[in-house]
Structures are given as structure tokens and as C-alpha cells.
Image (cartoon, rainbow, N blue to C red):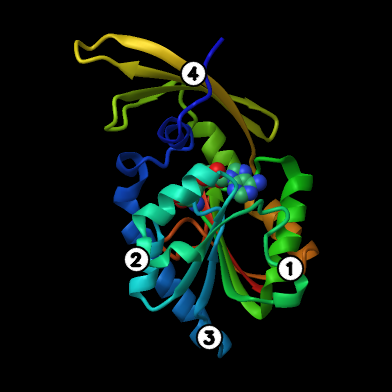
């Protein structure tokens, strides 16, 4: 039987080890800061309190804080929260373990946030019903006219480009091989992890499948509308250009009604 995956091995499964993901984080966070300020200006709103959920290891948070945003991070994985706290010791009380379908902020303190960020394909893990629960939680914790940004895959172009199988090697001796499978709207990542010994030999250390429900821009827009949001724009990523059939990713920005 395979052993339970260690925290850094689980981070490899989610593609959020520092080497796999952190390189892009600063750029993304600065682009997001610009998008939030631009929409704040257009809507006549001041946005400063940000919920980053799920935050993973908190890789976007330093760059958001440099732009004067007050950031709270929430993630289901308590080891990731501990790693985020260790990486940001002066902000350790700004991290909480929690499920995005039932956020750890009671009604007595809500609405608490001006902005909710959901980045790096962080919806779809619990099907459409789970995402509707998540959007209703985003609505509950955001103040009226608060700002929501969701960055995720754009289903059809992403499915067309999905290559078989991919291999990544984070810088901690872990090798991850992913076989991709798509059935309808569900993308399954069949992950197998190996550890590379000094001589180069690979030992298998674990396996984990992740199912992700994918959406088209129209489908995500109508789900958000049903959850009490006005969709302001759907970009083809952080570049602020309207999404097109060539974009494998999309960034949906919305206002809480
Ligand atoms: C692809 S990672 C993205 C993390 C972060 N947004 C980033 O860009 O680095 C997805 C994260 O979702 C977290 N997660 C999965 N299900 C969750 C849930 N129901 N509630 C909160 N976090 C969840 C995982 O622990 C993981 O850290």
C-alpha cells in the first residue's frame, strides 16, 4: 500500500511547489492589482481587504501586500496553511484553514471582504453543485459592490490542447507524471509521484487522481449571475483582452450585487 503523501508531495500534485508555480506569481499578482484598481476606479469603489481562497502556499500574497492590499488566505490543507504561515511569519495570523464551500467567517463578522480572489484553476473540484455552494459563500463574505476574480481554464480550447501525458520535476527530488483524461466537462488528472535518488533511479511514492469540472465562459457567467454577481468582463487571462476561442485560460471579473 502507498503511504500518505507528505506536504511538499501534495503541493506537487497541485502544481504549487515553489519552482512550478512561484515564478509567475508576482507578475500575476501585480496584473491583478492593476485590474482591481481599474475596476475600483470605474465603479467608484475603494478595494483593500482581500480574501485569497484557496491560497495554497500563499504565493500571490507578498506581491498583493506590496500593493497595499490587506490579504487573508484560506485553504483546506492545514499543512499548506502552516507552510504559508512559515513563509510569511509577520502575517501568520492572516491564514486560516477552511473549506471554500463553507468559509470560516460567521455571519456575525460578514460581509468582511472587498475582494475575493480564486486563482490557478481552483474551482471544479466538487462538481457544479460544489461550485454553486462556493459562489454563494463568496457572495456572503463579500460586501455589496465587492469584487470577485476567478482565474481558471476555458473548457473548449483547453480540452483541444490537452496533451498526453506530462512530466514535471520540482526542485525537491520529486517527479510528477500526469495522464490527462476528459469525459464531458470533467478533466481527470491521474497523478503518479516518484522520488529521484542521487543516482537518478526513480521510486514510485504515490498516486492521486484529481477531478476538475471545466466551464465555458458562458456557463461560468450564468452560474455567477445565479449566485448574485454581475459579470463585468471575461478576459483571456491576466492580459485584460476579451476571452477568445484561442485562450486556454480565462479570468472572470464580477461585482457582488
Ligand atoms: C491548484 S491549487 C491553487 C492554490 C493557489 N490559488 C495558487 O495559485 O497557488 C488548489 C488549492 O485548492 C485547495 N483546495 C482544494 N479543495 C478545497 C476546498 N474545498 N476549500 C479550500 N481549498 C481547497 C488545495 O489544497 C490547493 O491548495
Compared to 153, does 160 lie above or below? above
Mark 3 against mark 4, which lies toward the viewer?
A: 4
- The residue under the point 71% across, 59% down is 135
Of the pair 216 and 142, the residue shown nearer to us: 142
Location of residue 125 by image quarter:
top right
Mark 2 against mark 1, which lies toward the viewer?
A: 1
Q: Are marks 2 and 3 in contact (CB under 8 Å)?
A: no
Q: Are marks 2 and 4 in contact (CB under 8 Å)?
A: no
| Local crowd size for mark 4, using a 10 Å CA cut-off: few (<14), some (14–19), many (≥20) | some
Q: Find out if the beta carbon at label 2 lies less than 8 Å from the nearest ligand 1 atom.
A: no
Mark 2 secondary-structure assignment? helix
Of the pair 20 and 41, the residue shown nearer to us: 20
Label 4: which residue?
A: 206
Mark 2 against mark 3, which lies toward the viewer?
A: 2
Mark 1 against mark 3, which lies toward the viewer?
A: 1
Q: Find out if the beta carbon at label 1 lies less than 8 Å from the nearest ligand 1 atom.
A: no
Compared to 229, does 123 lie above or below? above
User: Which of marks 4 and 3 precedes in the sequence?
Assistant: 3
User: Which of marks 1 and 2 precedes in the sequence?
Assistant: 2
- Cα–Cα gap, marks 2 and 1: 28 Å
| Local crowd size for mark 2, using a 10 Å CA cut-off: few (<14), some (14–19), many (≥20) | some
- The residue under the point 49% across, 43% down is 79
- The residue under the point 26% across, 14% down is 197
User: Which of marks 4 and 2 precedes in the sequence?
Assistant: 2
Give the quarter of the figure containing the N terminus: top right
Label 2: which residue?
A: 63
Where residue 208 sits: x, y (%)? 56, 24
Give the numbered dot on residue 106: 1
- Cα–Cα gap, marks 2 and 3: 23 Å
Where residue 31 sits: x, y (%)? 38, 66
Compared to 211, does 217 lie above or below? below
User: Which of marks 3 and 2 precedes in the sequence?
Assistant: 3
Amino acid at each position: 500500500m502507498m503511504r500518505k503523501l507528505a506536504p511538499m508531495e501534495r503541493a506537487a500534485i497541485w502544481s504549487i511547489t515553489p519552482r512550478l508555480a512561484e515564478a509567475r506569481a508576482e507578475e500575476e499578482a501585480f496584473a491583478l492589482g492593476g485590474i482591481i484598481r481599474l475596476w475600483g476606479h470605474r465603479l467608484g469603489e475603494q478595494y483593500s481587504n482581500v480574501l485569497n481562497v484557496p491560497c495554497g502556499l500563499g504565493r500571490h500574497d507578498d506581491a498583493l501586500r506590496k500593493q497595499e492590499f490587506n490579504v487573508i488566505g484560506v485553504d483546506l490543507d492545514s499543512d499548506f496553511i502552516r507552510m504559508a504561515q512559515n513563509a510569511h511569519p509577520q502575517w501568520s495570523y492572516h491564514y486560516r484553514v477552511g473549506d471554500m464551500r463553507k468559509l470560516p467567517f460567521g455571519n456575525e463578522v460578514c460581509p468582511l471582504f472587498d475582494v475575493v480572489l480564486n486563482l490557478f484553476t481552483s474551482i471544479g473540484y466538487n462538481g457544479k453543485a460544489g461550485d454553486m455552494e462556493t459562489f454563494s459563500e463568496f457572495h456572503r463574505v463579500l460586501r455589496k459592490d465587492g469584487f470577485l476574480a476567478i482565474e481558471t481554464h476555458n473548457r473548449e480550447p483547453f480540452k483541444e490542447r490537452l496533451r498526453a501525458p506530462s512530466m514535471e520535476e520540482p526542485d525537491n527530488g520529486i517527479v510528477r507524471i500526469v495522464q490527462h483524461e476528459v469525459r464531458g466537462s470533467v478533466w481527470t488528472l491521474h497523478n503518479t509521484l516518484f522520488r529521484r535518488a542521487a543516482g537518478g533511479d526513480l521510486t514510485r511514492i504515490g498516486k492521486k487522481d484529481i477531478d476538475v469540472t471545466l466551464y465555458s465562459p458562458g456557463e461560468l457567467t450564468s452560474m455567477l449571475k445565479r449566485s448574485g454577481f454581475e459579470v463585468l468582463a471575461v478576459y483571456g487571462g491576466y492580459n485584460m483582452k476579451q476571452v477568445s476561442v484561442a485562450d486556454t485560460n480565462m479570468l472572470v471579473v464580477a461585482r457582488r450585487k
